[in-house]
Image (cartoon, rainbow, N blue to C red):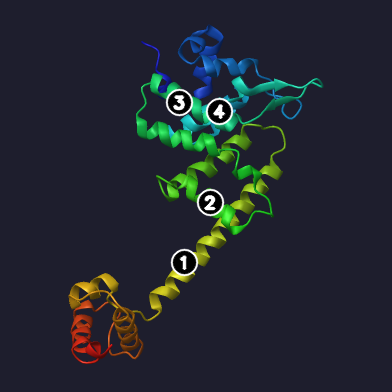
């Protein structure tokens, strides 16, 4: 029976079994040399495991979907080319998230993956350090920016993918203590949930506020006249009609009738 490919290995129950065997046999060095190179990358003194062992734990801890397993496999791929050992024996990996994200397309393309999946994984690799760096000094705007970047293509699922990667990354350091990291992620999620609830409340209030059923473009088309102060005056009039209960904010047909009456009477004087 032929050996499975990288995707098949990633979607297996325990990807590290195959990947570690390929590493021992030399096959991994042939099909994915950047991953194999992590076997020689220490993470001292912060972590006892080298970058490859940590990566295997992260992949195993990731949900068995292509995007999450690939993100787990490549989240630290940039540690190879960015590794620096300080004179006191400390490992440093400056900008390994950015460098790793730049490496993703070539690696995944060689494995036969499509452009859409590659772009999704690349985004996760680029962002994977951000959630665990959250602290109480982050503003609402900072949290919103992170959520927007993660959700750019896949919406809420993209945000969930990033959180899942952050959780898997932490579990990849077990049995080392990860309670502090999990607490940080919980605080980030709680902050984002507060913002989402706030946005939902504001949207609900906006939905209930009286407003003109017709916008400026619709009024221009209806009146067939040049733009001018009359547009705001007519929108204000229609809003007042909604507020008074004589017009529903969703009733565009009735609003057109009322607007035409206004144009025929007061509109000529405006």
Tell whether label 3 touches label 4 (CB within 8 Å): no
Which label sits in the foreground, 1 or 2? 2
| Residue topped by disc 2 | 145
Q: Which residue position holds label 4?
A: 99
Q: Residues within 10 Å of mark 3 (few under 14, many from 20)?
A: many
Tell me the quarter of the image containing the C terminus: bottom left
Asked whether the residues under the numbered discs 4 and 2 touch, taking CB atoms below 8 Å apart as contact, a structural biologist would say no
**Residue 182 location (% of width, % of height):** 65, 45
What residue lies at 45% left-to-right and 48% top-to-bottom? 151
| Disc 4 residue crowd, few under 14, some 14–19, many 20+, Cα 10 Å | many
Distance between the Cα atoms at labels 1 and 4? Answer: 37 Å
Between the residue at mark 4 and the residue at mark 3, the CA separation in whole angstroms equals 22 Å
Place residue 42 in its image quadrant. Answer: top right
Query: In the structure shown, which secondary structural element does the residue marked by tag 4 occupy?
Result: helix
Of badges 2 and 3, the one in the foreground is 2
Whether label 2 touches label 3, CB < 8 Å: no
Q: Nearer the viewer, residue 83 or 227?
A: 227
Which residue corresponds to mark 1?
200
* Residue at the spot of label 3: 10
Measured as percent of width and height from the top left, residue 178 is found at: 69, 39
Q: Which numbered disc flags the more N-terminal residue, 1 or 2?
A: 2
The answer for how far apart the CA atoms under marks 4 and 2 are is: 21 Å
- Label 1–label 2 contact, CB within 8 A: no
How far across and down, in percent of the image, does residue 154 sit?
40, 45
Compared with 117, 9 (above or below) is above
Earlier residue among tags 4 and 2: 4
């Amino acid at each position: 029976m032929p050996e499975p490919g990288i995707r098949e290995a990633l979607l297996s129950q325990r990807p590290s079994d195959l990947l570690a065997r390929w590493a021992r046999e030399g096959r991994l060095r042939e099909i994915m040399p950047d991953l194999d190179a992590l076997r020689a990358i220490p993470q001292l003194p912060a972590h006892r495991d080298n970058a490859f062992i940590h990566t295997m734990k992260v992949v195993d801890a990731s949900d068995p979907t292509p995007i999450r397993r690939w993100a787990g496999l490549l989240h630290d791929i940039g540690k190879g080319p960015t590794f620096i050992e300080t004179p006191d024996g400390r490992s440093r990996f400056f900008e390994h998230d950015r460098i790793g994200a730049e490496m993703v397309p070539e690696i995944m393309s060689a494995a036969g993956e499509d452009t859409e999946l590659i772009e999704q994984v690349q985004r996760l690799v680029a962002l994977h350090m951000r959630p665990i760096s959250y602290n109480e000094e982050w503003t609402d705007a900072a949290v919103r920016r992170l959520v927007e970047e993660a959700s750019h293509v896949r919406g809420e699922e993209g945000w969930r993918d990033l959180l899942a990667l952050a959780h898997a990354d932490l579990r990849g350091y077990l049995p080392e203590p990860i309670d502090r990291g999990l607490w940080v992620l919980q605080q980030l999620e709680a902050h984002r949930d507060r913002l989402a609830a706030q946005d939902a409340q504001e949207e609900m209030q906006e939905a209930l506020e009286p407003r003109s059923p017709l916008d400026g473009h619709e009024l221009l088309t209806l009146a067939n006249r040049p733009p001018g102060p009359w547009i705001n005056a007519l929108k204000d009039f229609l809003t007042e009609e909604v507020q008074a209960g004589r017009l529903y904010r969703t009733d565009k047909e009735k609003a057109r009738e009322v607007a035409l009456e206004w144009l025929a009477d007061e509109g000529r004087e405006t």
